[in-house]
Amino acid sequence: MLYILIGLFFAAAFGALMKARYKNGAENNNNAENASENAESAAPVVNSLGVPVPGVAAIEPDLDSALSVKPISSPDTVSSATYSSAAPLSAGSDSPYGYGAAHEAKQKTKPAANLLRWCGRSSSIKVNEGQENEFEVLNPVTYWSNGPSTVKEPCCIDITLPVEFLAPGDPLPSKGAVSYAEMTPVQRGIYLTWLAGGRIQPPLHLCYPAIWLYGLERRAVADRLDLGVCISEAFRMLPLARWDEVLKNYINFITWLAVKIWLPEDELLNLCKKIQTVPDELLSMLVSSYANSKLPLPSAVAFTVMRTSAKLRRAALGDNAFELPHSDEILQQFTPIYKNACSGGMVLPKTDKIITLTYKPTNPSLNKPIEDEREAKSKKAKQEADATITIPNFFDNLDAFTPLIKVWRDFAPGIKLPKSEPETAAESLEERPDFEQFLLSLIPNGNENAPLISSIAALGDLLNLTHPDINNVTNENIDEYKLRGRDRKTILDTIAIEGWQIVPNLSLSGREYYWHDKLLYLPIEFGAVLSRDYYASSYLLEFICSLCEAAGSMLDVKNFDLLRANLNNYFNLSDDENSRLNAQIVLNIPAAYNPEYYGSPVQIWLADPAARASVRDFIIELLNTLPGGPSIIKVITPLLNVSLDVPPQDPNNPAELEEPKTRGANILALLEPLFKNS
């Protein structure tokens, strides 16, 4: 995780309020918190970018087939995604041919200022360098230049152009722009702030996602590089594209790239879950492998095809056809009906029909008419030489889907959308990752100072992560509720970008997390790094609270605070970190799990029983500082031995006494492997 200080201007009213709440609480403990981000929403204008487009409005896009060459032979040529589970897994890091960071260029032979350069996930762009308001954009996934670029690329971030950032209370610009160069300094500040935030918040005007799409189009269409990255990033934008025209453009781009790299079935299904009406090209890709193998369509595929195909919906329901969002609950209702009606599953025959897929970029710089006749002939010859993308067309004639249409005709009218509890459905978020509104929904009525707590499932709903219903968890099926590593990474990436910390630490190695676990949200300033001392102290507090509760000696608030204060004798904790430790009492009392749960990571990482015994002895030493400590220790010691899998203490060989800071450093060295990912 990169902890580099970057500016982030949120929709400030809520961000400042939330972080001020924590700051006030921290000051009561002699702490200081910093948080202030700013951004607002703006009203859309007209046109695909919200403003008139001088000079390009009359240009009719003319796609040459070089922009739609043969698909990559295998999805294995694109490495695994590293950005978000909301993106296709076959999308990966940037091509090694990327140009790198703007601020790195000075250390090398300086390229021409008019060179158009790519800056993807592996580097960053600095604007206002050397000035008081210097700003760095990490992983912007777009083009930049150090002066006006010879290629008139609308998305190009010219780092020599002035940039201004809104102060709290400043009015937002209501108009859009057709390119980065034509933005006002304030618009550039808003755009760069959105990019720096990881593009996980809805943009404030439709011009920003439209201009950013230009860069993806140039990289994939003109440069023919980083196709996996481009589809991944476009996919992540789908829940945020609130304007129909922009959403349509992104879907068209994703469809073309999905066919070009031949997206695997599981990723196609994941993509189709995000869209209520899916293009025929994607659905044909989805079913083609089953038609060729003569295997029946699985219920998930059959459900997705009927739910998302506008043609099939109309064939089944006529004028009463309606769009339906994806729902695992509805899929479960559909499955037995479909399998009974289709004898286990419908077999789709092959088709000799084809779809020739073309793509017309929205980027005006890729659609310029060719005035030179010789160049036009050369281009036409290249079009004839290059193959266009063709895929089987299963939706030209719907007769093959007749059994499925009959099932949907009977099933769809009786569908009742399940209403989930707010804790697990994030109902008020309009199915897009609006993190601020999500946190706002966690505040109890009339108690603005209450801690912000939700289940992991609630945050997962916000991020469109699939998970089982946490209301049905039992001791027998609890393993089904384990949080996958991929989902953990998505959550951690999102939280880091948003400028918040979650407790417990989802990065702790060797520990299992479950969808029904509770999370506490604490603001943290961008770029701030919590120490290993903090992570060790947080883990020890969790462990000790569980031990005391299991022994029937639950810690009260006074003893919890005393225990937290005594940790300062052993570890180097800042005032801010002490405040964070104090805040986690709402999760630790009562304890979420038994002592064996907290002891298992230590057993995984410390194979030497003597090392685990040192952790046991340290916890005993720490508890001995509490009033009534000896009586507590007497009860919890057997629990400690079991949870850490160590033999009882040898009374004839007591633990060696050390200075508290030395003792803490030695324990931290033992526990550090648990926090290697933090």
Image (cartoon, rainbow, N blue to C red):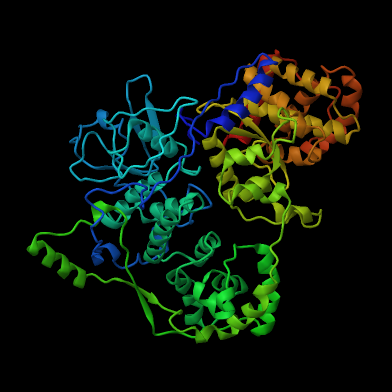
Residue at 21% over, 45% down: 152
Front residue (pair 409, 133): 409
Residue at 49% over, 86% down: 349
Q: Position of residue 549 (x, y in %)?
A: 86, 33
Visible residue check, residue 515: no
Residue at 90% over, 19% down: 628
Q: Position of residue 562 (x, y in %)?
A: 79, 18
Residue at 18% over, 67% down: 382
Tell me: 191 left or right of 239.
Answer: left
Q: Position of residue 65 (x, y in %)?
A: 25, 67
Instruction: Name the quadrant containing residue 31.
Output: top right
Tell me: 187 left or right of 456.
Answer: left
Looking at the image, residue 98 lies above or below residue 310:
above
Q: How many marks?
A: 0
Instruction: Name the quadrant containing residue 374.
Output: bottom left
Front residue (pair 365, 34): 365
Instruction: Name the quadrant containing residue 205.
Output: top left
Q: Quadrant of the C terminus?
A: top right
Visible residue check, residue 650: yes
Looking at the image, residue 605 lies above or below residue 621:
below
Tell me: 169 left or right of 26.
Answer: left
